[in-house]
Amino acid sequence: MMLWRRFASNRFALVCMIVIVLGLYVTGIFAPLLSPYVPTAQNLDAVAQGPSIAHWLGTDELGRDLLSRIIWGARTAAIVSIVAVSLSTIIGVVLGALSGYLGGWFDTLIMRVSDILFAFPSLLFVIFIAATVKPSAVRFVEQMEIAWGMRGLARSGIIDYFVVFTALSVIAWPGMARLIRGQVLSVKRMEYVAAAESIGASTYRIIFRHVLPNCLSPVLVAVSMGLGGAVMSESVLSYLGVGIQPPNASWGAMIWENSGEWRLHPHLIFIPGAVVAIVIFCFNFIGDGLNDALNPRNR
Amino acid sequence: MPIGDEILLDVKDLKMYFPIKSGMVFQRKVGDVKAVDGISFTVKKGETLGLVGESGCGKSTTGRAILQLYRPTAGQVLFEGENLGDLRGNKLRKVRRKMQMIFQDPYASLNPRQSLGSIIGEPLVIHGLAKGKDKQERVQELLRIVGLNPYFVNRYPHEFSGGQRQRIGIARALAVQPSFIICDEPISALDVSIRAQILNLLEDLQEQFDLTYLFIAHDLSVVRHISDRVAVMYLGRIAELADRKALYENPLHPYTKALLSAVPIPDPTVEAKRERIILTGDVPSPVKPPAGCNFHTRCPMAIPQCSQFVPPLVDKGGRHHVACIRV
Amino acid sequence: MAPLLSVRDLKTYFRTPDGVVHAVDGVSFDLAAGERLGIVGESGCGKSVTALSLMRLIPQPPGRIVGGEVTFDGMDLLALDEEEVRSVRGNKIAMIFQDPMTSLNPVLTIRRQLSEGLELHKGMSRSQARRHSIELLRMVGIPSPESRVDDYPHQFSGGMRQRVMIAMALSCDPQVLLADEPTTALDVTIQAQILDLVKRLCVERRTAVILITHDLGVLAGMTDRLAVMYAGRIVETAPTAELYENPKHPYTIALMKSVPRLDEERREKLFVIDGLPPDLIDPPKGCRFAPRCFAVIDKCWEEMPELMRVTEGHNAACWVDVSKGRS
C-alpha cells in the first residue's frame, strides 16, 4: 500500500493509469455496449465522411463507423497485450527464477536460448512465425471442423489472435527471464535466504516465499512497459498484414486499410495512429512512475 | 550450565573449496578458493567456542559448512555423533531443528516482506511444532524472551533498528528450541552502545536454555568476553586453539601474538607501554596459499623448514593446541 | 596563540521527507597546529557530518550548514566561495575516508590520481609530479613504488589502497588531516599498520589530525585530546589521558564500561546503555542523553546543558557530577 501511495503521489503517472484503465481496458471489455455501430457494418451511402453527429469520428472508405472500429480496436489491443504479456511473464519468471536459483547446465541452456532469440531481428522472427505456424494452424482447425462438423472457426480470425499471442510471447520472454535471473542471483545471496535454509525450509518454499517476492518490483515496471510494447507490436504486425486481419478491427490494420486515402481523408489514419501513440506514451509513464515509487533511494 | 565432557559437535578435517570457473559457453574449472583447508575441532555441550580471525580466513565459511548451507568438499561434521554430510532432505531438516544460526547483517537476514509473526513463526510451521493460536502465543513468548514487545507481531522489519532486528533474528533461531547456535559476527554490524545489549542477551539465553555456542567474530576483545575456548584461524586453517585464559595470557603462535598486540586497548597509559608486533604485507590469496605453514610469508620467526611442510595442530600441554614448528 | 582551526556553534541540518534532521547541532572545538584530536561517537551522532562540514562537502540539497563559524588560518571557511574553498580543500585541509575501495577512481592510474592535486595546487609539471608521486608512495610504505605508480586501484589490497589515500591526502603538505573512520573497513593487523603510519607521518610533518571513529581503543594511542559526540552535540572534551582516567559525562562512562577490553578477564555482565539514540528530527528538549542516562535528574529533562568546566581543558555537558552524586 506504501507503493500505491507513492505511485499516486506522482499525479501525471496516475492520470496515465486512469487513461489506460478506462480508455483501453474498460473500453475493450464493454466494446459491444459502447460502440454506436457494428464495427464491420458497411454503409455504402456514407463512405469516407468527416466527423458528424451520426459518425463522431467519420467513416472509412467502406462506410464503417470509425469510432466503433477504434473501440473494437481497443478490445483487440487489450486482449493481445494482456494475453501476450501474461504468457511471456509467466514463462520468463519461471525460467528466469529456475535459471538463477539452480544455476549449472539449466542456466547455461536457458541463457543461450535467450541469446539466440535476442540476436534474431524480432520483427523478422514474428513474420517467420506468422508465415510458418499460421498455415498449419489453419489447416489443423479446418480438419477439426470437418471432423466435428463445426463451421466458420477457421475463417473467424481467431487463429490470427493465437499467432499474435505466440509471436509476441516468444520474443518477449527472454527479456523477462534475464531480468528475473539477475534479481534472483542477487536476492539468493541475501542472508535471509540462508536463514530460511537453516530453519529447514524446502527449495520450493525458499524460491516462492523468500526469493521471488523480493524479485518482483522490477517485473512490475517491465510488465507495464511490456504492455505498451505489445500494443505497439500488435499494431505493427497488423499493419504489415501478418497480425489481425480485416474485417476484425485493429488499430494497425486500420492505418493500413485507410492509407490509400490519406491525402483526401488524413483523419482516417491520423486518429488510429494518435490512439496508438497515446496508449504507448501512457504505459511508459506508468512504468516510470512505478520505477520511481519502487526505487529505494527515493523513499 | 556447567560445561560437561559430552562432545556435541566434532569437526574432522573439514575442507571447503569453491571452484573458480572460466569460459563463456562451456565452463571449465581453473582453480579453487581454499576457504577452509582442513580444520578439526570439537565443541562440548554447554560451552562457547570462539572462532576468530581476519576477514577471508574462512571463519564464516566454517560456520556455514557445519550447518551444511555449503556442502563441504571433504571432512566430517559429526553432530551428536551423526555425520551431517550423509544426510539429505528430510533427515537434514530434522537435524537443523537442533542447530541454528544468528547472522551478521540484521538488515539482510530478515525477509523484508514478512511480518515478525511470519518470520518467527515460519520455523514452527516448517517443523509442524505449532499452528494457529498456539503459534501466535509461542511467537509472542519468543518476542518477550528476546526483549521485544509481544504486540510487534504484525509489524515489518523495516520499522525496527539494527539492534531490534538482531533480536528478531535471535527469536527466529530460538523458535525450534535448538541446542546449538552458530553466532556469525552477531554484533559487528551494530552500534557500540547496542553491542553490549545483544552480548548480554546471548549470555542470558545460554544460561536459560542450556545453549552451546560457536561464536564467530573478528573482534578479539568480544571473543575474550564471551568464549570458554578460542580458536584462531588464518587462511583456512587453525593456528592456535586453547582455553580462553591460556590463549589471551600466554599466546604461543606468532600469528596470535601479532593479532593480540594489534588490538588497541582503550587506555592511554596501557597503550603507551605496549609493544606492537606490526606484521608486514597482506594476507596471501586463498587461491594460491603459501606452501607449508601458510603464515611463513609474514612470520617474524620463520625458518626455511616452515615452507616445507604443513605444521600439525599439536597439544603443547593443558589442551593448548598450536600449529607451529617453532614453539 | 590562536588555534589553527576553530569551530564555533556549527549547525548542519538535512531536509528529509519526514522532517529536518538536526545532524550537527551546535558543535564547538579548537584544534592547535600539530595537535591530534579524536572525535568519538556512534553512527548518526554527527561526527562525519562535522568533518564534511569543515570541508564544505555537505551534499546540498538535502544538507545545509545553517549556522556557526569555522575559522581556519584567519579565514572563515563557511564564508568562502566555491573557488576559494577548492584552494583550501585537498591543499591545506585534506581528508581520508572510511572505504578505500570506493574513494579511489577505478579507471585512473594511481599516478594520475596522485598528480592531480600536485599539478593543481603546487603547479608541478607532469614529470615532476610523477617523481613526487613515487616519493609519496615510498613514504607510505608501498613496495617498489616506481612500478606500482602506474597501476590501477584494483591491483592494490584494501590496506595498500588506504596507504595510497594517505599519500594522496598528504601530497600537498596539508596543515590539517581529517581522517573519518580510516581503519574501520580494515582488519586489525592492517589497522595497526595504518595507524602506525598516520601517527608517524603526522608527527614528522607536524600535521594536525582530526581522527573520527567509534572505537575508543583506536583513539587511546593516537590522540592528544578527545571530544565525545552524542546526538549532534559534543558532550565531553578533555585531554586523552584525563578522559580515560576520569570521565565525567554519563554517556562517556557508560560507553567505556559497555565495551569489552582485550586486557581484561570477563566481567560478569557488560554495562548496558538501554534504548536507542534519540530521533534527531525532534530531539528531546533537555539533555539528549537523558532518556538513556543512569544519573538523570529532573533538571535534565528541562534544560539542555552546555559544556561546563571540570578541570583545566576538561569540559562536560552534564548537570550532574557523577563522582559526587549530585550537582
Image (cartoon, helix red, strand yellow):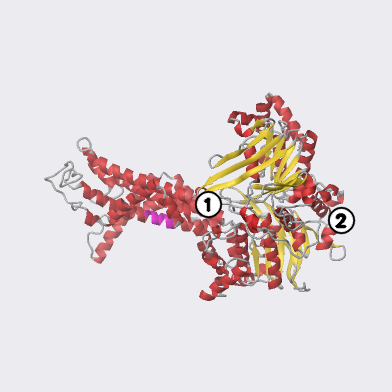
| Residue B19: x %, y % from top left | 65, 54
Asked if the residues shown at circle 2 and circle 1 are in contact, with their CB atoms under 8 angstroms apart, the answer is no
| Residue A158: x %, y % from top left | 28, 56
Three-letter amino acid code of the residue under disc 2: Ile
Q: Is residue B313 visible?
A: yes
| Residue C38: x %, y % from top left | 73, 44
- Label 2 resides on the chain identified as B
Three-letter amino acid code of the residue under disc 1: Gly
Magenta-colored span: A84-90
Disc on res. A182: 1
Q: Is residue B51 magenta?
A: no
Disc on res. B325: 2
Which quarter of the figure has residue A197?
bottom right
Q: Residue at x 83, y 57 (%)?
A: B311
Q: Is residue A134 visible?
A: no
- Majority secondary structure of magenta residues: helix
Left/right of residue B10 with respect to residue B94 in the rendered view: right
